[in-house]
């Protein structure tokens, strides 16, 4: 039982905010087909996306993050670290995926903007 509890411990290094944030992403290894989606949560170190395609662990994504009340998007590159499938309604049309994305390239100032946004909502 104690081993099970340890596996469930939080492994994130940064605070995450549960918030729906608009994201446009491109898979790096495919033709440039930008896709609009939502982030389920966001932190200085990464995000959780809701996607309609099955991404693979280690896929690289070019990201444009549209924080509320921000005039310009934040650009980042992220790596998929996990993917979980869930279904809404009919299995043939309702397949969705949560994808945990770690930022591997992000401007320091943009990371600070994300952190500032998170704490402005939390506090």
Image (tube, helix red, strand yellow):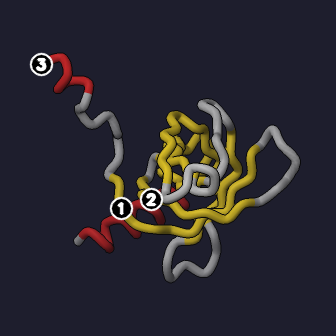
For mark 1, what is the residue?
A: 18
Query: Residue 67 at what x, y percent from top left?
Result: 52, 72
The Cα atoms of the two marked residues, 1 and 3, are separated by 29 Å
Query: Residue 17 at what x, y percent from top left?
Result: 35, 60
**Residue 40 shows which numbered tag?**
2
Can you tell which quarter of the image residue 60 is in? top right
Dot 1: element: strand
The crowd level at tag 3 (other Cα within 10 Å; few <14, some 14-19, many 20+) is: few
The crowd level at tag 1 (other Cα within 10 Å; few <14, some 14-19, many 20+) is: some
Compare marks 2 and 3 and give the one earlier in the sequence: 3
Are the two marked residues, 2 and 1, in contact with CB atoms closer than 8 angstroms?
A: yes
- Which residue sits at x=53%, y=53%? 49
- Which residue sits at x=44%, y=52%? 44
Can you tell which quarter of the image residue 33 is in? bottom right
The Cα atoms of the two marked residues, 2 and 1, are separated by 6 Å
In the rendered view, would you say 19 is above or below 59? Answer: below
Compare marks 1 and 3 and give the one earlier in the sequence: 3
Compare marks 2 and 1 and give the one earlier in the sequence: 1
For mark 3, what is the residue?
A: 1
Dot 3: element: loop
**Which residue is most to the right?**
31
């Amino acid at each position: 039982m104690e081993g099970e509890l340890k596996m469930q411990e939080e492994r994130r290094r940064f605070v995450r905010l549960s918030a729906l944030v608009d994201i446009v992403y491109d898979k790096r290894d495919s033709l440039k087909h930008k896709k609009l989606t939502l982030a389920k949560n966001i932190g200085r170190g990464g995000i959780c996306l809701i996607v309609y395609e099955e991404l693979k662990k280690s896929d690289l994504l070019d990201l444009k993050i549209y924080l509320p009340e921000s005039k310009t998007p934040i650009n980042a590159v992220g790596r998929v670290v996990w993917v979980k499938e869930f279904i809404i309604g009919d299995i043939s049309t309702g397949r969705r995926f949560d994808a945990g994305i770690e930022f591997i390239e992000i401007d320091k100032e943009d990371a600070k903007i994300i952190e500032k946004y998170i704490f402005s909502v939390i506090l």
